[in-house]
Image: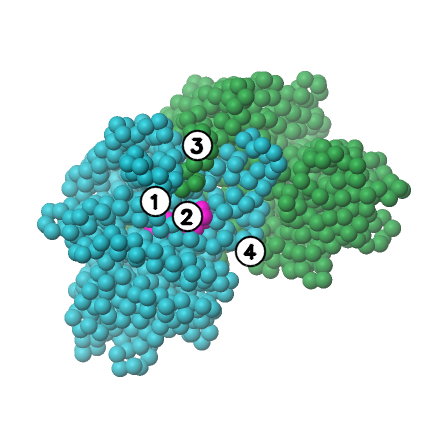
Chain colours: A green, B cyan
Amino acid sequence: MTYRAPVAEMAFTLRHVAGLDRAIAEGLHGDLSDDLVDTILEEAGRFANDVVAPLNKVGDRHGTPLEDGVVTMPPGYREAYRAWTEGGWNALPGPVEYGGQGLPILLNAACIEMWNSAAMAFGLGPLLTAGGVEALSRHGSEELRSRYLEKLVSGEWTATMNLTEPQAGSDLSVMRTRAEPVGDGSYRISGEKIYITWGEHDLTDNIVHLVLARLPDAPPGTRGISLFLVPKVRPDGSRNTLKCAGIEHKLGIHGSPTCTMVYDGATGWLVGEANRGLACMFTMMNNARLGVGLQGVAIAERAYQQALSYARDRRQGRASTAADGASAIIDHPDVQRMLLTMKALTGASRGICYLTAEAIDRAHRAPDEAARRSAQARASLLTPVAKAFSTDIGIEVASLGIQVHGGMGFVEETGAAQHLRDARIAAIYEGTNGIQAIDLVTRKLPLENGAVVRGQIGAMRLVAERVLKEGGPAFGHTAPRLRETIEALDRATSYLLKALGSNRPDEALAGATPYLRLFGLAQGGTCLAQSALAANAASKAGDGDPAHPARIALARFFAENLATASRGLEETVIGGGGFLQDGGLALAG
Amino acid sequence: MTYRAPVAEMAFTLRHVAGLDRAIAEGLHGDLSDDLVDTILEEAGRFANDVVAPLNKVGDRHGTPLEDGVVTMPPGYREAYRAWTEGGWNALPGPVEYGGQGLPILLNAACIEMWNSAAMAFGLGPLLTAGGVEALSRHGSEELRSRYLEKLVSGEWTATMNLTEPQAGSDLSVMRTRAEPVGDGSYRISGEKIYITWGEHDLTDNIVHLVLARLPDAPPGTRGISLFLVPKVRPDGSRNTLKCAGIEHKLGIHGSPTCTMVYDGATGWLVGEANRGLACMFTMMNNARLGVGLQGVAIAERAYQQALSYARDRRQGRASTAADGASAIIDHPDVQRMLLTMKALTGASRGICYLTAEAIDRAHRAPDEAARRSAQARASLLTPVAKAFSTDIGIEVASLGIQVHGGMGFVEETGAAQHLRDARIAAIYEGTNGIQAIDLVTRKLPLENGAVVRGQIGAMRLVAERVLKEGGPAFGHTAPRLRETIEALDRATSYLLKALGSNRPDEALAGATPYLRLFGLAQGGTCLAQSALAANAASKAGDGDPAHPARIALARFFAENLATASRGLEETVIGGGGFLQDGGLALAG
């Protein structure tokens, strides 16, 4: 079973959940038409299915061996990457003035999902390049922009993000890499960076490293970190003094080289202001976080497709509904529950990620400042949820995919296990999911004194009310379950805002992870309900597409089976912090 | 960080949760003394720490290559296995008349946990041998018993279970392997079996295969399956006509060979009655299911120890409670939550497994028939929970262990990832966890018209009431949360019994998996509360062991943070079956 991009489902979600239709109608995307959106999705789907998907297993098996500083990418990667850039896929969201197509982040989000479903290790590299484009566009000098942006936009060169050092992971304040001014506007960068994705490879002639480092006179901590552009090949064509000194042997994404990079007085240039590197890096990371969330959706979608296909073919036992002989295992209620859980979590996280992408587009493109600022706040709020919820469920769905396969799932040949191995990193990189939860609670909830999160909860309530009014019997208990979930989120939100306002940050921190999950259930359930409402309207209008009743049934399944966790999560957020008082006493014994 | 057997915690759980003290006081275990129990646990712990634990990574790296039908076990396995059998560890629970020590299954459960924490791939083989001893003791002819039991009890030879064929996994009715009577009391066995754990290896001179096959005149389906003993080496010293034709390349337990076995007219002998093979195999599998549950506990314990150690060493960021400088990450509330979740789930599942083992002991050893039958019913009820809940949490805890490590967790060198890879199989083999849930709901709940499950729920209630009466402020909201969980279980049980009684089996099947989880939370929370009550009593009596307050804090954490999921699970069991009506409609779109 290979991957087939779910183009129709993506298009439906873009339009009816994330609001692409409305954005187009409002003129936010220039002359972008519905037809063009469909054409792009179709073409991207074809490319993902036919060119990228075959790389998935190859990359896992071959890995990316390092010899004498040279990393050899898996067979087929080079050709596929070239076809990918030549097809214009790298340039899709890039700025028009540097050769990009300037298409919405939202449309690109669907494409990112496709590339990463097809082969996550392959799809990962371009995510980093996109982050580099973002950082350079916003903060780079005109010289750097004119020298690098066009080639990064096209994908002729790739970019990396260099943050982590052995002693500096989630806490970048203790970073040690140094940058010495040369006097001609350039710097010499020295230090060691670890976990550098695509830090070295043989797909392109040059690699543009964005490296955090300290200037000699920098203040200590995070306010003394600057961002530098350090190319593998200098503008004069000479090799820079940097190298890949090691490759990690990882659980998954074997087709993506994770490098230890050593900078030995390498030539670099400052990006943005001195000592403001972290801010520059964060603009880069916010989009990257959405990208990683999409990887969670992507791997979940692929694992679901594979499990569904297996469950339709594999015959074992006789279901109560079967006439005679062995049933396909999909006919057993417990297997149905697993598959529905996989599909519902995938759809919910897709909705959240696309919604986030739409907010980012609107933050850039809305005509008036207030709308832009409001959209930016919404994007800020949703980004940690998109990242963490989607990557958590990516792991859960991949693990369920193995379970559906039974013993076959544990055998590597089947391919189901690779999805779990690949999915596992997405909850860690670009800020662990714990960091996302802390970001959501301590930085995003307080935005505009809580008005941003309240506004989002209000929008969820409107959807639940519409389900109550418009939904027929096929919606079952979707409305009350969704409503309960949203109210649980509202109460948990009040509790956390109060804890933060009363200077009891640890209580908020203790509940951050279950709160983020609760947020994901409420928002995800709302997205599926929106999709179900649109499907219901289409069916009523005479559209006989069988996907419509399926959308209603999926929203119902989510509300009745998964969103039900909300009350327990609320209780945990509000009443679970007892362990703070005893200072981890339970861990002492 | 290597493994240290948590001997004191195990001993405490054996005595105060599973009731070993009471069983000894009642004279169920002959002259077994408290001192002897402690000595055995200490010695087993030393052996697990020093001899078995070092095999874990070696086994993962080397795997078990197959060449010309010969499987080479990883370096060190042979010596360790010999030391293990010579130390009498294989013989610990074995029947005295065949050289076993006849010690309680319960005591052995703690030892099984240790071997599997130390190296799951190593611990797995002896679990199969123990199953073979069980089947042969109960169902083998005197000739077979005298020929094979002594060597299986000592571990001089190992045993295997041969059930699965490519087309026959969870559904054994479609099995094809044949057995032709030779006329001299022996049979010729022909067929192909897959997923045969330790089917071939170089640790012992002989391997005793227990193989399900069909006699020529057998009725179709599961009532035409017989069990045969098929040795690798025949009694006359000649090699039997069977071989290992392949080895699976698996996600984990690389140190345990998973073989495709081909029987080509191999000599075998009938075990038990003709066509009753499945019943024989099930006696073997029930104990094996508890053993696999213990693997879940084991891998969770090891993953927890490793994460705890890392979290104490690794410094990142400053916790709000810290005076100055970087804090150990264990001081961050979110990391504490992860570690506490790991420890609480591990302790809860340990309690459930030990409780199950005690019921099995009592079913064999109680002086009167009624007590034996009642204990057997309890063991039957608890076994699927012990297997499925423990192996589910094994995966969850191992995955959390990776998360605590951040990026380091994704790098194989760290060892955290191996635990997840190893843990994943335990939810699949010996009956998938879905099969366990179905077994629990459709076969175990109806036992004695529901009186068995009601009795178990009643026992849980007594513990919750004791917490309410005896528990001081350190117990926080343990009592109400535990009580709610138990009542949710009670209501869900009523619903399922009613569905089964009203001939609506699919409704029960649809809720089976969330019901098993709910059962595990109620029973696991009860076990931790029992441990906390005993700790509380000891503290009050002047015992200053810091493990006592830790036990109370852990029970509290579980009740306030994890058992809170119970209401949602109840709602899902009772209200989640809507997908049955639309026949998987949501999967169609």
**In whole angstroms, how far apart are the C-alphas of marks 1 and 2?**
9 Å
Residue type at mark 1: give it. Answer: Ser
In this view of the protein, which residue sits in the foreground, B272 or A581? A581
**In whole angstroms, how far apart are the C-alphas of marks 4 and 2?**
19 Å
Q: Which residue is mark 4?
A: B413
What's the chain of the residue with tag 3? A
Q: Nearer the viewer, mark 3 or mark 4?
A: 3
User: Residue at position x 27%, y 64% from top?
Assistant: B91
Q: Are marks 4 and 1 on the same chain?
A: yes
Q: Residues within 10 Å of mark 2 (few under 14, many from 20)?
A: many
Q: Which residue is mark 2?
A: B300
Q: Are marks 4 and 2 on the same chain?
A: yes
**In whole angstroms, how far apart are the C-alphas of marks 3 and 1?**
24 Å
Numbered tag placed on residue A48 in the rendering? none
Task: Give the secondary structure at mark 2.
Answer: helix
Q: Which residue is mark 1?
A: B349
